[in-house]
């Protein structure tokens, strides 16, 4: 399976680490062209490559991880393709440091992204987590790191869930794409939340419930 990264910053590289470790391929892209990505590609070994935004957009999973102010330009370079799975990892900061002002919308950020990519199956994920937490091993002594996600297409979400479980995360489906608002920076209760699912405790509960 191939992942196409639109944007080659902290979040894209954090996700790419899990992609490569799981035996998948990744192609990085940015607005400056593949020739600027040699150092990024070298850090991930032979399963990584650099390409244009259009080439990244042809992957099985397309990860959108650019600054919010660049989203329209980034997705505008995607060729039309029905059924494309787009993982929206953006946060709607209208401006960053030192002010960090959120872009307050009447709809969720991912709903706007979906409107810009007709025919795509958009899944909101990873945006509520800081880069170092995404990059870290999701399997901890306490359990697996929870990964919240939301989307409208059930088949795409099932495939996404299977892949991130393979990465080691404990995926939690929030429901339709509009529920991605729960992860947004402008007041979403899950924004910045990092939690683990205590698998061992759950296994003990399951075992005890099965006893006669």
Image (spheres, rainbow, N blue to C red):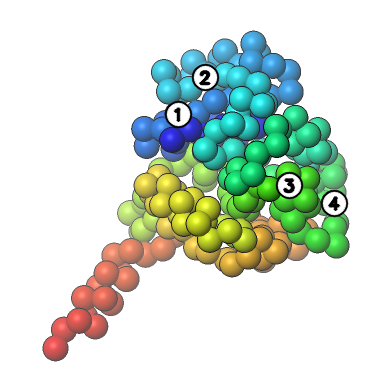
Where is residue 140 shown, x and y percent of the image? 36, 51
From the image, tell me which residue sits under label 3: 118
Query: Within 10 angstroms of label 4, few (less than 14), some, or many (20 or more) residues?
Result: some
Quadrant of res 7:
top right
From the image, tell me which residue sits under label 4: 103
Which type of secondary structure does the marked residue at label 4 adopt? loop
Residue ID at (46%, 57%): 158
Asked if the residues shown at circle 1 and circle 2 are in contact, with their CB atoms under 8 angstroms apart, the answer is yes
Say whether disc 4 or disc 1 marks the residue closer to the N-terminus.
1
Instruction: Give left or right: position of 195 versus 22.
Output: right
Give the distance between the C-alpha atoms of the residues marked 4 and 1, in whole angstroms.
Answer: 33 Å
Give the distance between the C-alpha atoms of the residues marked 4 and 2, in whole angstroms.
Answer: 33 Å
Query: Within 10 angstroms of label 1, few (less than 14), some, or many (20 or more) residues?
Result: some
From the image, tell me which residue sits under label 1: 25
Give the distance between the C-alpha atoms of the residues marked 4 and 3, in whole angstroms.
Answer: 22 Å
Instruction: Give left or right: position of 29 versus 17.
Output: right
Where is residue 78 shown, x and y percent of the image? 71, 33
Where is residue 137 shown, x and y percent of the image? 41, 43
Asked if the residues shown at circle 1 and circle 3 are in contact, with their CB atoms under 8 angstroms apart, the answer is no
Residue ID at (57%, 66%): 174
Query: Within 10 angstroms of label 2, few (less than 14), some, or many (20 or more) residues?
Result: many
The quarter in which the C terminus is drawn is bottom left
Asked if the residues shown at circle 2 and circle 3 are in contact, with their CB atoms under 8 angstroms apart, the answer is no
Which type of secondary structure does the marked residue at label 3 adopt? loop
Residue ID at (65%, 39%): 81
Give the distance between the C-alpha atoms of the residues marked 1 and 3, in whole angstroms.
Answer: 25 Å
Say whether disc 1 or disc 3 marks the residue closer to the N-terminus.
1
From the image, tell me which residue sits under label 2: 49
Quadrant of res 206:
bottom left
């Amino acid at each position: 399976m191939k992942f196409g990264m639109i944007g080659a910053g902290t979040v894209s590289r954090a996700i790419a680490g899990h992609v490569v470790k799981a035996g998948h391929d990744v192609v990085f892209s940015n607005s400056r062209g593949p020739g600027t990505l040699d150092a990024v590609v070298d850090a991930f070994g032979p399963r990584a490559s650099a390409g244009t935004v259009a080439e990244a957009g042809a992957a099985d999973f397309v990860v959108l991880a650019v600054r919010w102010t660049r989203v329209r330009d980034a997705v505008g370079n995607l060729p039309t393709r029905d059924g494309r799975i787009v993982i929206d990892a953006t946060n709607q900061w209208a401006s960053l440091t030192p002010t960090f002002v959120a872009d307050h919308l009447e709809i969720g950020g991912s709903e706007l992204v979906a409107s810009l990519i007709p025919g795509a199956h958009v899944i909101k994920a990873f945006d509520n987590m800081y880069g170092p937490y995404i990059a870290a091993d999701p399997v901890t002594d306490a359990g697996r790191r929870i990964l919240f996600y939301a989307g409208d297409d059930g088949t795409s979400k099932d495939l996404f869930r299977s892949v991130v479980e393979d990465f080691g995360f404990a995926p939690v489906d929030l429901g339709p794409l509009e529920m991605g608002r729960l992860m947004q920076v402008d007041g979403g209760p899950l924004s910045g939340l990092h939690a683990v699912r205590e698998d061992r405790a759950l296994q003990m509960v399951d075992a005890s419930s099965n006893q006669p």
